[in-house]
Image (cartoon, helix red, strand yellow):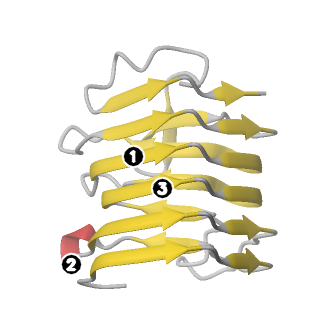
Amino acid sequence: EFAFEGAVIANNIVDKAATGITVTNFNDGGRLAVVQGNLVRNLFFRKDPDSRGNGISIEADTVVSGNVIENAPGFGIAIGWVSYLRDVSVTDNLIRNAHIGIGVSTDPSAGTALITDNLITGSKDGAIRAMNGPTPIGPDLAHASAGAYRNLAVYSNIAR
């Protein structure tokens, strides 16, 4: 988890867990990963702060593509945390029944995130939300422009 470089996380099933797949800790050197073709479902919360009920969490130099995430009480996909975000691509994922489908950091020092061609259904607090730390801000970016956020490119997602 800490100071990794060059990880491929592919073709796994995560079922009934407090946390799905975590590729984070950019501040400790964690970077450069591919997260592809995984099935993550039936997540839950625990009282400890590291068990957030998120499907996939990423921070730096990472591609997330072709995953299916279902029943996440936190984020389906969490992109970055405050300034810990650089060069992330999130494409062609299916997210069902998450509290927030995709949450992405919009801290002024955060790097770029490309979010495109994802199908998000049943999210309770928005399909794609800009985040200020743990707090969602602004409109659902699946239905509104991301132009107010210099670090985001959000295109061609479907949210229902």
Gap between marks 2 and 3, in whole Å? 21 Å
Give 75 or 12, whichever is nearer the viewer. Answer: 12
Kind of residue sitting beneath label 2: Asp
Give 33 or 99, whichever is nearer the viewer. Answer: 33
Q: Count the numbered circles shown.
A: 3
* In this rendering, the label closer to the viewer, 2 or 3: 3
Residue 122, position in %: x, y?
82, 39
Q: Quadrant of the N terminus?
A: bottom left
Say which label, 2 or 3, has the lower sequence index.
2
**Residue located beneath label 2 in the image:** 28
Q: In the shown orientation, is residue 64 left or right of residue 95? A: left
Residue 81, position in %: x, y?
36, 56
Q: In the shown orientation, is residue 5 left or right of residue 72? A: left
Kind of residue sitting beneath label 1: Ser
Say which label, 2 or 1, has the lower sequence index.
2
Residue 53, position in %: x, y?
67, 67
Rendered position, 115 above or below 75: above
Kind of residue sitting beneath label 3: Val
Tag 2 and tag 1, C-beta contact below 8 Å:
no
**Residue located beneath label 3 in the image:** 64
Residue 106: in sight, yes or no? no
**Residue located beneath label 1 in the image:** 89
